[in-house]
Image: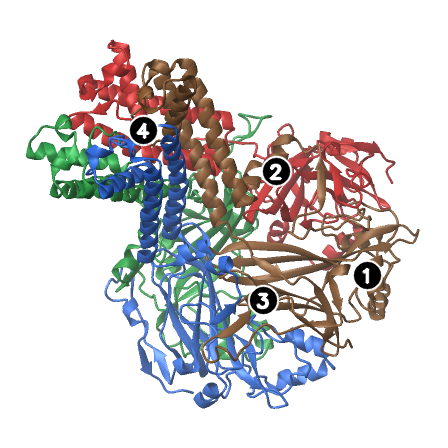
Chain colours: A red, B brown, C green, D blue
Amino acid sequence: MIKKTKQPLSSELLPHKSFQQRLADRRRGSSTLVEQEVKREDLGFGTAINDASSRLVNKDGSFNVVRAHQGFWNQVNLYHTLITMPWPKFLSIVFTFYISSNTLFATFYSLLGYENLVGLDKVTPNTAIGRFMGAFFFSSQTLTTVGYGHISPMGYWTSALAAVESMFGLLLFAMATGLMYGRFSRPVASIRYSTNSVFAPYLDINGWMFRIINQRTNQLIDVEVEVSLSRLDRKPDGSLYRRYYPLKLERSKVSFFPANWTLVHPITDESPLYGCTAEQLAESDTEFLILLRGVEDTFNQAVHSRFSYRYDEIRWGQKFKPMFTATVLAGRATLVDLDQLDETIPAELN
Amino acid sequence: MIKKTKQPLSSELLPHKSFQQRLADRRRGSSTLVEQEVKREDLGFGTAINDASSRLVNKDGSFNVVRAHQGFWNQVNLYHTLITMPWPKFLSIVFTFYISSNTLFATFYSLLGYENLVGLDKVTPNTAIGRFMGAFFFSSQTLTTVGYGHISPMGYWTSALAAVESMFGLLLFAMATGLMYGRFSRPVASIRYSTNSVFAPYLDINGWMFRIINQRTNQLIDVEVEVSLSRLDRKPDGSLYRRYYPLKLERSKVSFFPANWTLVHPITDESPLYGCTAEQLAESDTEFLILLRGVEDTFNQAVHSRFSYRYDEIRWGQKFKPMFTATVLAGRATLVDLDQLDETIPAELN
Amino acid sequence: MIKKTKQPLSSELLPHKSFQQRLADRRRGSSTLVEQEVKREDLGFGTAINDASSRLVNKDGSFNVVRAHQGFWNQVNLYHTLITMPWPKFLSIVFTFYISSNTLFATFYSLLGYENLVGLDKVTPNTAIGRFMGAFFFSSQTLTTVGYGHISPMGYWTSALAAVESMFGLLLFAMATGLMYGRFSRPVASIRYSTNSVFAPYLDINGWMFRIINQRTNQLIDVEVEVSLSRLDRKPDGSLYRRYYPLKLERSKVSFFPANWTLVHPITDESPLYGCTAEQLAESDTEFLILLRGVEDTFNQAVHSRFSYRYDEIRWGQKFKPMFTATVLAGRATLVDLDQLDETIPAELN
Amino acid sequence: MIKKTKQPLSSELLPHKSFQQRLADRRRGSSTLVEQEVKREDLGFGTAINDASSRLVNKDGSFNVVRAHQGFWNQVNLYHTLITMPWPKFLSIVFTFYISSNTLFATFYSLLGYENLVGLDKVTPNTAIGRFMGAFFFSSQTLTTVGYGHISPMGYWTSALAAVESMFGLLLFAMATGLMYGRFSRPVASIRYSTNSVFAPYLDINGWMFRIINQRTNQLIDVEVEVSLSRLDRKPDGSLYRRYYPLKLERSKVSFFPANWTLVHPITDESPLYGCTAEQLAESDTEFLILLRGVEDTFNQAVHSRFSYRYDEIRWGQKFKPMFTATVLAGRATLVDLDQLDETIPAELN
């Protein structure tokens, strides 16, 4: 999705470079077009997405991209789908698959003759449905290798089918149980982001801030956050194209992440947000893209989390309320109240 | 837990910068408040924890933080809890779950009628309790898929319940056995830290030192140690706030860690510990936070370990006794005596 | 395969250094032979592969190297082979192994006497083949632990053999099911490369370009690409030797890889491709070696992919057609058409 | 094992710094003892191992260190031991454990009364040994969950014991099968090092060289090698202590490792080996320590390998014979003959 452009990218919709920087640029001499293009920030979305009404990153961290002609097998990508789908859906699929397999094998057994399933008549009624259900139950006992034996296969073909089914069952349940445990043990950065970001006073200037907490009991260490701003800028010919700017953070890495963390982008004169109004952000379809990387404590596995804030998810002139009340457990531990993640209070901007 | 402050952070409780450094700072010109704030060390605990009686990192490496309103499921975090709990507790839970599941299913079978469990009367007495226990044993044979068949299900509903139970059993035991093996194979940095750290002579100055050993037979490679000092400093307005200083180590990384390692922070005039007395460390609630990272040899997995020493866990004017006695196995291997980890001998400070 | 050469490597078949660079080299003073050798790029293939008709990296990413005297066990490398072979082949092997094991154990049971398998006569005809097949089915029921019990072992030796077989079966199926799941869950960078690379206009110069897409639904992040050019250069004595040049890319790393990515090597006067014609590339047996590294989203695992383009897989004066049609799903998401990966249109070179 | 020394480390047994370097050192002004100590190379073995007859790293890559008072459980470290032991030993342990468990449970069943194992008399003779063996076989059928049912438990206690055993069996076999697969799938850098290293001519000087091959079919990528020299140097007071020097390599990293690689340390005047004779290397107990890191291709897992050469494993005035014969498969692939790894031919030193 990365498109090359022949025009020099010199004019922007919004100011984002200090005077000093521009001067320094000029002093360095004429940079060629290639150098300019190499320096241009690109997250991998490209410049052509200039439709102001679609967001780049969805609230669940997935990319807002649809692929045509992906091919059935690539689109399905069984493993990824089965690992990430919700538990109820996953268990329904396992159960459905179990029922279907048993129905299929019961049909096979019926074709080979019910008389080859010894003991069937003692388990279910001797009717068409009863016999089929008996074969179904025999199949389930074979598939799960429980094998009571009150129904048992007789003759070459029925015995062979049972032998194949039990092997098939072992391989099949290996997948199901592997997926069960894989889902259960998958390391995830269970980060909760504040519903809104804020424009708040910061030291003697202002800052754009959002707040995160680790929802889980397990620890994250070496947490690193990257924030990029994406917005539509205007080329000299007046056409819109999407640009990306890395946002400098007051602190982008912490060794420990015991509770909450307020991330601050100080709006200095070098910030692409310097001097911007809420209207300008809306007009240029501004989106803040967040990528968090960390290490999960239990198995030392890398985890990450994506999130985005759009221009309409910023509260102007609000700051976050502190989340901890040191007095309650004073002398024993620090108390943090996770319910206060979204709490903000008005604060006069500088 | 990272709080922003509007006041410049210029005055400290204890000296920690050489005169040369301060001069260099001044020569570089007026750094803005933002630059100062960006440069401030923060491990992720924030500045607001100024209650002198609570420690930040517990002796087992966990953080001394309590979270309110975490939500039941996030608080429980089954996987993490089940992987890290002690073995007896884990096995009790598995056993309890097994008993409970069988009790539940036995109840279901009893509701569907004991007469549908053929052979029950030959296994247990034909009393209320006997029949229930028979159903319980049938359930256990189904859940584990052992399926002897001397008790066997009859009729649609009991057969269907047995089919469901055997599938449920396979999925359930997949979790239990996955956890068993996950616990067994989890890579841990089994580092033992000396009970106390020491203030000992080091070359022509003094140093703060602690000693570690790898308790296990498996090797750790590329071991890296980070030490931070956390203490309460005083703002110009007299209020206390918590500050963090990285401590430079004589050697912070080794490729091999065959036996013991004494980590040394040389107390030069650039050290935040320069000129400090035991009383000052106590007064400022000093804590040394240690983060060790390494690679476990067997599966090449990253491991880490956290630890902390408080001001009252320092022995002044003591140095560690050497741990190896080269004479015993001379000519064949180097001998290290792990029992001597905590042994110190008096040493005159410089 | 890295060979050392005694002659200074000063003359090249094709120009690849700007005049400024050579001047700078000279000004730095006489670099010794060692310095020159250390600076020489080598990917690990060495300089001696000067046979122009063999390619270094095959289309599937494997190396085009044959090893003699590798030793049977090292050559086979069961695990790697079983994990990477196609599914039909893997399942055939599992099935064949299952049949063979059962045949082997059936033979053992027959040697211990069919009379020790109680119930055999009720399952299969009482003929030589019938009895053997019965033993075969009993073996399959033991190996998979389904154990119906309508055939059951009697006496010491047959019982002992059944006990051994069931243990053997558990270990065996552990391998089979482990491999099943290992194959299923193996993280792969399912990258599709455009069939051809192109020489296309790029800004005010030209560039060598290829295009890639992620075929799967799961995301890749932090994708990094390294491209090297390999070709035969001529030594002063006229003999050919293989040299490697890293190719600078317009952009070699993206944080997100939501859809397609066109990689561009701008042909500036510092490029080893500067001024080259199609004939020169063919003459010098030019091959472009590509190494892609990324992180797979589901389990945060590192993945990589190798590919190569040869001189005859370049289209001159063609550029890639854009792959997305923003209009279709406008306002909801970005649409990318994967079928257009290979589409190029003529473009006049600069 | 890292010991601090109070004396400045100024005099060495062997020359290892160029005159220019020493001059530069002096010009930088008086470095304090701390700075010197920080700069001293230490791999983690410390300076006190001055017994010339013991080697630091064994031929299999393990460290030549013995630990006293390690504590039974830490010493055993079951998981690491079970994963790394040879296959025959591992399978014997699994088999022994299976036999022992069955014997134990058979004893329990005998204590609860053989009459509670229905069908026992039909399987084994009705003697003391026969009944015990019957219980043993019943136990094995329960432990592996094969559960034929021709022997079945009766009554509360025997049924309960069978229920416990089948659960115990599932957990137990989970460990065994997990270990089976863990052993099978463990990524190892199967590097073979040439038996000897050589002192050979290299360009216009000499070099110390060794050669490695990847024995397996699976690929290693991003292979990096670190070589350190360890030898006894003499302090000003005449006492010996062990010092470590990193050795610069001609090339220490390759992206691809398709076949063999000759690693070269060029003996420039900056090398600690400059001007050394075979006698001096023997006298100072010189050992070359090698650490190789790479990424295994199948699962993208990090692997490493350790090795060491001692002074008596160097061939002077020999160079390695090329390992590939390009002519055999010319035009199709490059052929490498792994049997030639150790082949050297005489070469006059510069």
Left or right of residue B236, residue B34 in this image: left
Identity of the residue drawn at 61% across and 31% down: B73
Can the viewer see residue A219? yes
Other-residue count near label 4 (Cα within 10 Å), few / some / many at <14 / 14–19 / ≥20: many
Left or right of residue A260, residue B37 in this image: right
Give the CA separation, mark 1 to mark 3. 29 Å
Query: Which residue corresponds to mark 3?
Result: B339
Q: Kindly report which numbered mark, 2 or 4, lies closer to the viewer in this rendering.
A: 4
Q: Kindly report which numbered mark, 3 or 2, lies closer to the viewer in this rendering.
A: 3
Query: Which residue corresponds to mark 4?
Result: A143
Q: Of label 1 and label 3, which has the lower sequence position?
A: 1
- Compared to residue D34, the image places residue A260 above or below, namely above
Give the CA separation, mark 4 to mark 3. 55 Å
Instruction: Where is residue C278? Give x, y as percent.
Output: 39, 55
Question: Are the residues flagged by discs 4 and 3 from a single subunit?
Answer: no
Label 2 element class = loop
Q: Amino acid at mark 3?
A: Asp
Say which mark, if any, is on residue A190.
2
Q: Nearest the camera: B52 or D325?
A: B52
